[in-house]
Image (spheres, helix red, strand yellow):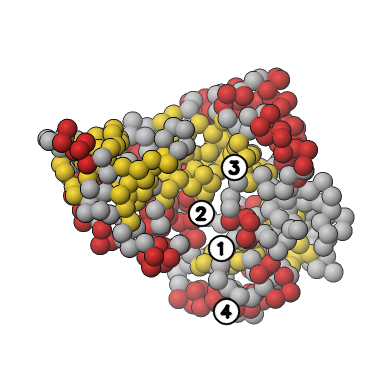
């Protein structure tokens, strides 16, 4: 996107309420002294002679030539005459440039994005073989890493569309553990050394909501799906505070570079929650975050007991809990009402049982938190809607504007239920392209 913008829209600014975001560095100098410096900034700044666009409370497009910011908040927009009412403010002449609101990404994984940017990225790998060579080169250049980690592979885009195997990795990197997450984070690719450290062999039983992919002889192939990924994740040392800080900084820089000034972080751990809170209180959080606490975090009860919160700078708000019903289509983990056409007898996975989901909903709603439920398959969506309806009858909470994340494959008779139950279908346009070759 940034290359397209650079080629076709050379006069665009993106403006965040708590800091300015230059899509193009040449335009940054006009705002850097008034909105983004570390030194104390004047309370009020007026941007005038701009070509501004925004939306009103009725979602109607509005244009303006002047924008007034006071203590990080937009307090007025209007024509160029508006600037005359703020003679004591810092006046910035936009010279006719275009000003757009910062973009909000309604579903992201901030730390995962950061780690991906700091690790090897396999999104562009055209095949399993090339991915393995890329991994081997990465490993050779980083001999200090105990674990070789990365993300982004997508077997659906590779010749044959088959899952990769540990053998492909073993031939190039046999002695160091390798763990590569699929592009959607719902499957992992391990080499034999990683399987060994995790204690995974032909006798290992997959946990509920997970699958260990096996060959014809029953041996693990190196692919672990959904909850089975925890078998490897639990033996990987947790990231240090320094590593988390580096990941958040890398993710923030990337998001800001493409005009995203706010994101909803789906699945925040207790350690991330504490770190984000500290960054927000010190005004060092560069992107506004709407945190969805992970329902599987051991500290969930403590966080719920503390109640919903937002820091004084409006940088980090917490009032939502993320829970999974199923997996993803690409790993055949999305829970479907009918079996997968290319895998007879298999209808996906339920990562959280219906009974567990009911308990989480009741606990979360009782604490005054919104519930954001991951559901991709039509069975996963049906269960999510059923349990939200059940929760309304038992503990209420309709006013909390619950969400179903992705809402990707939905039975026709369930579509009207979103409106009837006041549930937000939080859909991601990327699925229209990433999964288009898996669905009719």
Residue 376 drawn at (x, y percent): 69, 48
176 sits left or right of 343 in the view:
left
Say whether marks 3 and 1 touch (CB < 8 Å): no
Say whether marks 3 and 4 touch (CB < 8 Å): no
Judging from the image, what secondary structure is the residue with disc 1 in? strand
Which mark sits nearer the N-terminus, 3 or 1? Answer: 1
Say whether marks 2 and 3 touch (CB < 8 Å): no
Q: Which mark is residue 133?
A: 4
Judging from the image, what secondary structure is the residue with disc 3 in? strand
Pair 2/3: label in front:
3
Camera sees residue 351: no
**How far is disc 3 from disc 1 in space, using C-alphas?**
24 Å
Q: Which mark is residue 426?
A: 3
- Foreground pick, 376 / 226: 376
Judging from the image, what secondary structure is the residue with disc 4 in? helix
What residue is drawn where x is 54% and y is 34%? Answer: 320
In this rendering, is residue 197 above or below 326?
below
What residue is drawn where x is 48% and y is 64%? Answer: 119
- Quarter of the image holding residue 169? bottom right
Residue at numbered disc 2: 112
Q: Which mark is residue 86?
A: none
* Disc 3 crowd, CA 10 A, few/some/many (<14, 14-19, 20+): some
């Amino acid at each position: 996107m940034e290359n397209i913008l650079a080629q076709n829209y050379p006069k665009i600014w993106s403006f965040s309420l708590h800091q300015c975001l230059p899509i193009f560095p040449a335009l940054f100098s006009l705002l850097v002294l008034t909105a983004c410096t570390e030194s104390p900034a004047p309370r009020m700044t007026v941007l005038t002679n701009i070509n501004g666009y925004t939306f009103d409370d009725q979602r109607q497009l509005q244009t303006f030539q002047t924008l007034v910011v006071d203590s990080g908040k937009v307090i007025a927009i209007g024509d160029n005459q508006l600037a005359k009412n703020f003679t004591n403010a810092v006046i910035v002449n936009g010279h006719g440039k275009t000003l757009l609101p910062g973009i909000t990404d309604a579903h992201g994984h901030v730390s995962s994005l950061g780690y991906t940017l700091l690790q090897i990225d396999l999104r562009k790998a055209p095949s399993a073989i090339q991915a393995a060579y890329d991994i081997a080169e990465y490993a050779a250049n980083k001999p200090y890493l105990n674990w070789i980690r990365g993300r982004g592979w997508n077997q659906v885009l590779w010749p044959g569309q088959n899952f990769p195997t540990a053998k492909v990795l073993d031939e190039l990197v046999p002695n160091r553990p390798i763990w590569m997450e699929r592009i959607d984070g719902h499957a992992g690719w391990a080499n034999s050394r990683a399987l060994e450290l995790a204690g995974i062999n032909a006798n290992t039983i997959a946990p509920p909501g997970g699958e260990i992919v096996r060959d014809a002889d029953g041996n693990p192939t190196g692919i672990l799906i959904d909850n089975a990924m925890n078998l490897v994740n639990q033996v990987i040392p947790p990231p240090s505070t320094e590593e988390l800080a580096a990941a958040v900084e890398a993710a923030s820089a990337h998001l800001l570079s493409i005009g995203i000034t706010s994101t909803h972080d789906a699945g925040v751990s207790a350690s991330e929650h504490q770190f984000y809170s500290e960054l927000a209180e010190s005004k060092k959080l560069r992107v506004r975050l709407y945190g969805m606490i992970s329902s599987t975090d051991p500290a969930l009860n403590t966080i719920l007991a503390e109640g919903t919160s937002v820091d004084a700078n409006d940088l980090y708000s917490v009032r939502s809990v993320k829970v999974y019903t199923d997996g993803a289509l690409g790993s055949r983990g999305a829970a479907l009402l009918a079996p997968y056409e290319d895998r007879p007898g298999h209808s996906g996975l339920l990562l959280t049982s219906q009974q567990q989901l009911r308990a989480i909903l009741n606990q979360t709603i009782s604490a005054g938190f919104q519930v954001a439920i991951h559901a991709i398959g039509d069975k996963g969506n049906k269960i999510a809607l059923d349990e939200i309806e059940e929760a309304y009858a038992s503990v209420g909470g309709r006013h909390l504007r619950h969400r179903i994340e992705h809402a990707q494959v939905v039975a026709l008779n369930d579509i009207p239920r979103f409106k009837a139950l006041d549930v937000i279908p939080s859909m991601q346009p990327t699925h229209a392209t990433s999964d288009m070759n898996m669905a009719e």
